[in-house]
């Protein structure tokens, strides 16, 4: 697809972009009809060049309003929200010690009016507890809604409790499980291991009966309509009225709009559809020029349009769902409106429609959220989102600081990041009180809190190895373990002195990081969407959609939306089309389509080709090779000269055995990543299935945390069934954007260190041969000089 239009760049600062955007959006009124178009035309999207030769219509646009199907969803519905969806994927919900609290946050959408809400709770308590003194409390927004005795004779419990609706508010509601647990009446160890209660988050759930509200038709409520607090996946339809066949331009519009919806939903799943007519029972985003959408607008609205047009209306016949209109006088203005919709996460004017006069953005691209750190650099905890707080008491938790790393940081980096901590702690701590530092759950350092009079540290420095950080999101946990000075048997335990404050002017000092990304890696893709998000505007990415059918198109949009959620970037400059990009293009290529629609030349270098039905590679186990073989001092010296393989700690690529059999992909979806055969150093990622229907089903299943978070290797196979994901590493590695012969040879030698031995022998022989030749010529020269002197 040719890119004949100028590029827009995302902002260096999101706030600056939003300020410019909001200031340029003017609510429409009757008086606005005389407003002149902007004198400076805005930069255009990197979208396909509009052309009539690839676009056909069944009827003149706007000739008649398209009929709306009958309402398919009831105004009232019953919903269910498993507790597992509100906590970490593999995290248990365990309440330990004599007193413990576990807090989760329950979303309540403003689009729903709750009529009833109940909590079904499955929990197991210790059989060592004193029933008369052990209690579980359930608290909603600081109000107790239920209490249960922890009976040692009935440790397995399943209860149902109603939650008063007056306690629930729009937004996130605090749900707490608080236990008091005792095994004796006196002289009790509050940290005894038999003091526990476990809540099963997989079988415990919230259920509610709710009614959809009529939503105000105001742009200021736009992010109210697209709501991450819905319990079920958000559904919407991208409508292109009157089109009989989707064009590359429409494909790009739909991709940008889907990414905007996905970013508004944060990390929540969604379901996108597309059609040339409205769909009942869901929100509809209608895209097209003003002529094409004339059937959806009033005469006043059409006459008022003098630029990019954004509007929100109730869906005809269904006031509980909306119709968002993205339009303009021509395709350039439609492109600008689509980009504005994707970028804005700030409240728009309190009007039903508005004109986007211009969209002026800074030159350097940036992320909407989750921007990775620039290294080297010094960052305060305040910059990273940490809010200063004081921790009180025994086992009261710790501090958490999220950090986003670039997708191409190397595991070979031997540098250290520096922590400069500013903290203070109370007096009368026992000698074994410490301040622990973890990175992604792995212990790194400890600081002993040894001063009995308490102390303040304004510049306490410690070092964390860069290899402890991973690409994408990292969590640095700083946990004070404060133990009272007096903890003897049958003595009162004083906890009021156990206080610790970590100040927000503490610093991270990051060195210049080694940037070397080893691909293929679906695990890296799931963590950061790298390398497709390496340029946050998608300028280095191309998307080839192998079919024009609704299922294939929406599968591609779903993948783009998920990538935007993970990377925090709006990939608005990616090259997208229904035809494969040129062979000489040097971009990261995404391919989405049914197996039979993907050209054979694209999968020519795939380690497992979906096109080869019945011929697959199966993993076999082999004994691992030792990391080192050197035993004698000479061998160790040679090993040091050669250098230790930088990837020696990595698992070796498994061996494969080929088996030919009659097989086919029935319900599975396959993702495979490998080096491009035409663009050395760039990856191709193919997502395919046996049919377009299975492809869409698999792409929707991919949004589930249990699938997306566990992608790994270069080959993944899954379907819509739980626990169906299988991953493998079957192909060769390469270094991203590495084209030099030296680097590629080095990569191969790191994967196969034994190759160094023959190379070293050959080099020694060549050196010996060179020295021998030089000495022989010198001897011949000296002999000739002696003969001349004798003569």
Image: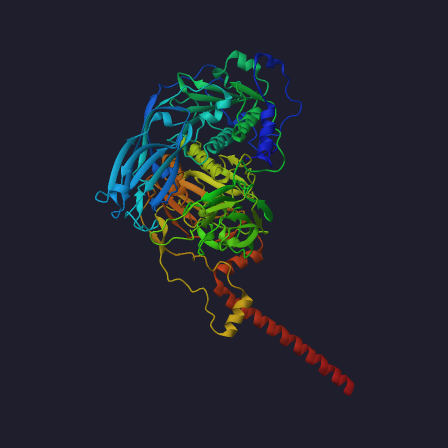
Residue at 54% across, 66% down: 642
Q: Can you say which quadrant of the picture contains the C terminus? A: bottom right
* Image coords of residue 56 (percent x, y): 49, 24
Residue at the front extreme?
A: 491
Residue at the left extreme?
A: 153
Task: State the image quarter where residue 547 is shown.
Answer: top left
* Image coords of residue 695 (percent x, y): 39, 37
* Image coords of residue 14 (percent x, y): 57, 34
Q: Residue 126 or 374: which is nearer the viewer?
A: 126
Task: State the image quarter where residue 548 is shown.
Answer: top left
Relative to 289, is 364 above or below?
Answer: below
* Image coords of residue 729 (percent x, y): 42, 52
Relative to 251, is 390 above or below?
Answer: below
Q: How is the image coloured?
A: rainbow
Q: Residue 368 or 3: which is nearer the viewer?
A: 368
Residue 666 seen in the current view:
no
Residue at the bottom extreme?
A: 790
User: Would residue 54 be found to the left or right of residue 116 on screen?
Assistant: right
Q: Residue 719 or 190: which is nearer the viewer?
A: 190
Relative to 752, is 567 above or below?
Answer: above
Residue at 44% across, 15% down: 65
User: Would residue 345 be found to the left or right of residue 121 on screen?
Assistant: right
Q: Residue 738 or 603: which is nearer the viewer?
A: 738
């Amino acid at each position: 697809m040719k890119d004949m239009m100028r590029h827009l760049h995302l902002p260096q600062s999101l706030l600056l972009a939003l300020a410019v955007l909001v200031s340029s959006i003017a609510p429409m009124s009757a008086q606005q009809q005389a407003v002149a178009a902007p004198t400076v035309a805005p930069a255009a999207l990197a979208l396909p060049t509009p052309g009539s030769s690839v676009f056909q219509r069944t009827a003149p646009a706007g000739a008649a309003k398209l009929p709306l199907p009958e309402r398919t969803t009831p105004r009232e519905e019953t919903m269910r929200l498993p507790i597992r969806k509100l906590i970490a994927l593999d995290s248990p919900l365990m309440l330990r010690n004599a007193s413990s609290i576990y807090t989760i946050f329950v979303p309540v959408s403003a689009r729903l009016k709750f009529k009833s809400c109940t909590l079904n709770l499955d929990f197991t308590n210790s059989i060592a507890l004193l029933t008369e003194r052990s209690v579980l409390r359930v608290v909603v927004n600081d109000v107790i809604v239920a209490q249960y005795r922890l009976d040692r004779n009935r440790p397995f419990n399943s209860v149902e409790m109603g939650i008063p609706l007056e306690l629930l508010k729009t937004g996130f509601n605090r749900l707490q499980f608080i236990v008091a647990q005792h095994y004796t009446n006196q002289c009790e160890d509050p940290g005894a291991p038999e003091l526990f209660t476990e809540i099963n988050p997989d079988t415990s759930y919230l259920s509610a009966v709710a009614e959809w509200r009529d939503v105000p038709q105001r742009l200021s409520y736009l992010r109210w309509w697209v709501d991450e607090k819905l319990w079920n996946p958000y559904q919407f339809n991208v409508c292109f009225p009157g089109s009989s066949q989707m064009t590359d331009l429409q494909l790009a519009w739909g991709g940008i709009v889907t990414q905007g919806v996905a970013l508004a939903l944060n990390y929540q799943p969604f379901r996108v559809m597309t059609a040339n007519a409205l769909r009942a029972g869901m929100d509809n985003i209608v895209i097209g020029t003003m002529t094409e959408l004339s059937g959806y607008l009033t005469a006043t609205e059409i006459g008022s349009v003098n630029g990019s047009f954004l509007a929100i209306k109730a869906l005809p016949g269904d006031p509980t769902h909306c119709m968002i209109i993205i339009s303009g006088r021509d395709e350039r203005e439609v492109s600008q409106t689509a980009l504005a919709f994707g970028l804005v996460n700030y409240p728009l004017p309190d009007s039903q429609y508005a004109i986007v006069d211009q969209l002026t953005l800074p030159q350097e691209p940036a992320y909407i959220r989750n921007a990775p750190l620039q290294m080297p650099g010094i960052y305060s905890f305040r910059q990273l989102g940490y809010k200063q707080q004081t921790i009180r008491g025994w086992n009261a938790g710790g501090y958490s600081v999220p950090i986003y790393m670039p997708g191409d940081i190397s595991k070979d980096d031997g540098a250290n990041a520096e922590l400069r901590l500013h903290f203070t702690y109370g007096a009368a701590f026992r000698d074994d009180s410490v301040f622990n530092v973890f990175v992604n759950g792995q212990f790194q350092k400890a600081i002993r809190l040894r001063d009995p009079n308490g102390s303040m540290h304004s510049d306490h420095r410690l070092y964390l190895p860069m290899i402890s950080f991973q690409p994408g999101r990292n969590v640095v946990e700083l946990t004070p373990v404060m133990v009272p000075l007096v903890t003897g048997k049958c003595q009162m335990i004083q906890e009021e002195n156990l206080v610790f404050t970590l100040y927000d002017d503490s610093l991270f000092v990051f060195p210049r990081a080694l940037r070397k990304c080893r691909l293929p890696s679906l695990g890296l893709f799931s963590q950061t969407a790298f390398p497709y998000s390496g340029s946050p505007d998608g300028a280095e990415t191309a998307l080839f959609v192998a079919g024009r059918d609704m299922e294939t198109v929406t599968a591609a949009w779903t993948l783009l939306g998920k990538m935007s959620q993970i990377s925090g970037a709006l990939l608005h400059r990616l090259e997208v089309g229904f035809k494969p990009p040129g062979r000489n293009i040097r971009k990261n290529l995404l391919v989405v389509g049914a197996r039979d629609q993907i050209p054979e030349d694209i999968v020519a270098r795939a380690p497992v080709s979906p096109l080869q039905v019945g011929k697959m590679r199966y993993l076999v186990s082999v004994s691992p090779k030792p990391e080192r073989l050197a035993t004698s001092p000479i061998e160790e010296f040679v090993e040091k000269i050669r250098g230790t393989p930088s990837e020696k700690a990595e698992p070796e690529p498994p061996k494969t055995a080929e088996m030919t059999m009659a097989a086919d992909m029935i319900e599975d979806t396959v993702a495979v990543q490998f080096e491009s055969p035409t663009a050395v150093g760039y990856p191709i990622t193919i997502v395919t299935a046996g049919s377009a229907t299975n492809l869409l089903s698999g792409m929707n299943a991919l949004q589930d945390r249990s699938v997306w978070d566990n992608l790994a290797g270069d080959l993944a196979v899954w379907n819509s069934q739980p626990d169906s994901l299988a991953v493998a590493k079957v192909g060769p590695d390469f270094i991203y954007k590495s084209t030099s012969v030296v680097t590629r040879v080095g990569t191969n030698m790191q994967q196969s260190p034994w190759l160094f031995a023959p190379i070293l022998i050959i080099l020694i022989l060549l050196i010996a041969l060179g020295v021998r030749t030089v000495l022989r010529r010198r001897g011949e020269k000296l002999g000739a000089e002696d003969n001349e002197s004798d003569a």
